[in-house]
Amino acid sequence: MNERKKDQEKNDGLYLKRIARIRSDFPTKFGIPRQSGLVPELRAKIVFEPEYRRREALEGLEGYSHIWLIWEFSEAVREGWSATVRPPRLGGNTRRGVFATRSPFRPNALGLSCVELAAISEEPGEGMVLWVSGADLMDGTPIYDIKPYLPFADAYPQAWAGFAGEVENYHLEVDFPRSLQSAFSGEQVQALIKLLAADPRPAYQRDPERIYGMPFAGKDIRFRVADGRLTVQEIMDL
């Protein structure tokens, strides 16, 4: 094979540069909202890689209320792919086409999230950072691009939600004793209640006697679910 042919094959794919990482309260993917924007109380910080810590790269961004993040499902990268996946909200047993879902198990493990841009600030040792609300990303997730959200072009209120719309109203009642809430700020408590109400358990696990643990903000939230009610049992240090 000649060198020109090799170069053509090598450049057939797109090489992505990591521009930033997100810093969030989720050390693992367990408990993360299944979509961005569902829990606006969640706060996170986007820290740019040194090469991209340039103030002029963010000029004008303060005029937008929301931004798109293009990122990598870094815990789901794999060599092969499957044409169908099992969406958790359908019980984990029903298969749907991978391109009809937002599953992380895709030919390219890329995610897309719309988040609120809460603030832009300069931080010691980090340069210019973005503070966002409603992110559904695990701590340390690589970010490959940031684009402004345009409501006149990006919003379609009458769009169909497909089979995902069939389960959007599912939620649990949450019993979170006040005596256990002191480990968190008021905003974190509100975020936790919404996260737990969305039922962070894997869809195939429904044992009412099982105690689950969800890591969040340096703590392990221990809870049990029975008869449509989630009860927080204990808060432990990680």
Image (cartoon, rainbow, N blue to C red):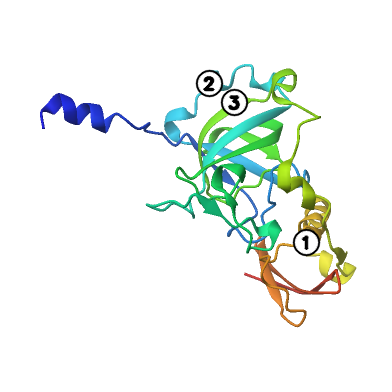
Quadrant of the snapshot with the N terminus = top left
Q: Amino acid at mark 2?
A: Ala
Say which residue label 3 marks.
147
**Quarter of image, res 149:** top right
Quadrant of the snapshot with the C terminus = bottom right
Tell me, yes or no, whether the two marked residues, 3 and 2, touch with CB atoms within 8 Å.
Answer: no
From this view, report whether residue 199 is shown above or below residue 117. below
**Quarter of image, res 198:** bottom right
Neighbourhood count class around disc 1 (C-alpha, 10 Å): few under 14, some 14–19, many 20 upward: many
Between discs 1 and 3, the one toward the N terminus: 3
Q: Amino acid at mark 3?
A: Lys
Point out residue 123 in the picture as x, y percentages from the top left corner.
59, 36
Left or right of 151 in this view: 17: left
Tell me, yes or no, whether the two marked residues, 1 and 3, touch with CB atoms within 8 Å.
Answer: no
Point out residue 93 in the picture as x, y percentages from the top left corner.
63, 64
Q: Residue at x 84, y 63 (%)?
A: 172
Query: Which is closer to the viewer, label 3 or label 2?
Result: 3
Q: Amino acid at mark 1?
A: Leu
Between discs 2 and 1, the one toward the N terminus: 2
**Quarter of image, res 179:** bottom right
Between discs 3 and 2, the one toward the N terminus: 2
